[in-house]
Structures are given as structure tokens and as C-alpha cells.
Image (spheres, rainbow, N blue to C red):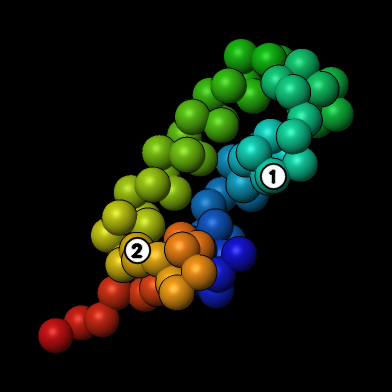
Amino acid sequence: MSDCFLRFLTQLPASQREVLLLHDLQGFSGPEIADQLRISLHNVKIRLHRARSRLKHALTEGCDFTRNERGVFVCEPKHED
């Protein structure tokens, strides 16, 4: 992961970041996360939705996205003019 992406990821509330990492990066299912964190499946879904929404907004506002010479998607901090 790029430093730019990680910077915004770490700014998420811990409860949202935890669910996002478990689901999107580690591949746990909603019920597995609910069981592991001892929260309801409904709460897992809410936290995941909020985390994705916040992260998308932060990345859109703070990053420029390009592809490098190998075609890999790259996130860079926006440069202020």
C-alpha cells in the first residue's frame, strides 16, 4: 500500500478501520467479523459502509491517482498550487 493511502487509512476511527481491514484486506466474512469483534452483523455492515465512505471521500480530496509504467494504480498526495 502506498504511504498516501496508509495515511488516510490510519485517520479512520479505529472501529471502522478494524472492520475494513478484516473484511477488505484479510477476507473475513461479515459473520466472522461479527463473531470475532463480538458485535452484531448489522453493526459490521454499518462500520464497513462508513469506513469505505470516509476513506473514499478522504482519498478523493487528498490524492491524485495515476498508473505507473507497469500499469499499477498509484496514489500520490495532491500537490497544493
| Secondary-structure class at tag 1 | helix
Question: Is label 1 or label 2 in front?
Answer: 2
| Secondary-structure class at tag 2 | strand
Residue farthest toward the left in the current orientation of the protein: 81
Tell me which amino acid carries mark 2.
Phe
Position in image of residue 16 (x %, y %): 59, 41
Tell me if 55 is positioned left or right of 35 in this view: left
Q: Residue at (75%, 34%) from the top-left corner?
A: 27
Residue farthest toward the right in the current orientation of the protein: 36
Q: Which circle's residue, 1 or 2, is located before the other in the chain?
A: 1
How far, Cα to Cα, is label 1 from label 2?
A: 20 Å
Give the vertical position of 19 relative to 73 (above or below): above
Tell me if 44 is positioned left or right of 38 in this view: left
Q: Are marks 1 and 2 in contact (CB under 8 Å)?
A: no
Give the vertical position of 27 relative to 73 (above or below): above
- Does residue 14 appear anywhere in the picture? yes
Tally of numbered discs:
2
Position in image of residue 77 (x %, y %): 37, 75
Disc 2 crowd, CA 10 A, few/some/many (<14, 14-19, 20+): few
Position in image of residue 41 (x %, y %): 68, 15
Position in image of residue 63 (x %, y %): 34, 66
- Does residue 15 appear anywhere in the picture? no
